[in-house]
Amino acid sequence: MAGPGIDANTPAAQVAQAWGMAYVNLVERLREHHQAKTDLGLLMKPYLDAGMLVPGELLVQMVIAGLGAAQSWMVKSFPHSRAHAQLLTDHGYLPDLLVELCLDEASQLDRMGGWRQCAKCGVKRHLFTHPPTRVGVCDPCGAPYPALPDHLRSMCLEKIADYRERTDDVVGYYQGRSRLVRVSAQGGGEATSARFAAALGGSVAP
Ligand SMILES: [Zn+2]
């Protein structure tokens, strides 16, 4: 689980692959079932077409189908609610740990609102994923990049608050069962994957 702007898929998929764990990214799996018109995909179609939430039981069935008979497993982008978490538990899938990737608000804003266009030469770049040689300064022309406009900053802050509100219940569900671990997503993807693996008691194989 991770807030907006924080990439959870890369470290989760890396650790799952390194450890031979079954891995289900719910968003990807939903798309696959929908496109392949599987039985589950067809059951979910009316909800997706109507822009309605897919019932938790169908989502849980999809997760379970994706995990197969695996002894160790990891799920991303699920559960979305306390009710989903309880359904997973009822089906015998209580995870050992819920990993939440965390960042301070300023860093999260850097990632969410990192796209900038130089006012002088027009070059666009993402200041976090492709940082210029000098912090905040356009490489080709040396002009400073503009700050994140206030309306975009407010939008990003709203998304962060919305994530917190939506996930508080799920986090509380696993925290109450002593299964929550928070991992810093500071720095690059490799550092995050290493911390992610360490939180699970191991390391990412070289
Ligand atoms: Zn420039």
Image (cartoon, rainbow, N blue to C red):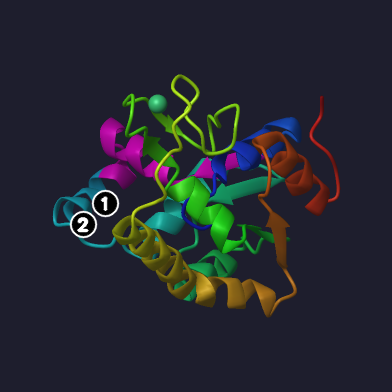
Residue sitting at x 52%, y 39%: 136
Residue sitting at x 28%, y 39%: 34
* Tag of residue 47: 2
Q: In which quadrant is the N terminus drawn?
A: bottom right
Secondary structure under tag 2 reads helix
Extreme top residue here? 140
Horizontal side of 34 relative to 195 (left or right) equals left
Label 2 sits on what residue type? Answer: Tyr
Does the beta carbon of the residue at mark 1 sit less than 8 Å from ligand 1? no
Image coords of residue 78 (percent x, y): 49, 57
Please report contact status of discs 2 and 1: CB closer than 8 Å, yes or no.
Answer: yes
Nearer the observer, 58 or 141: 141
Q: Quadrant of ligand 1?
A: top left
Q: Which residue is mark 1?
A: 44
The dominant secondary structure in magenta is helix
Looking at the picture, does residue 42 appear above or below residue 158? above
Quadrant in the picture for residue 183: bottom right
Image coords of residue 47 (percent x, y): 21, 57
Magenta range is 21-41
Secondary structure under tag 1 reads helix
Residue 200 visible, this orientation: no
Q: CA distance from mark 2 to mark 1?
A: 6 Å
Looking at the picture, does residue 32 appear above or below residue 54? above
Image coords of residue 48 (percent x, y): 21, 52
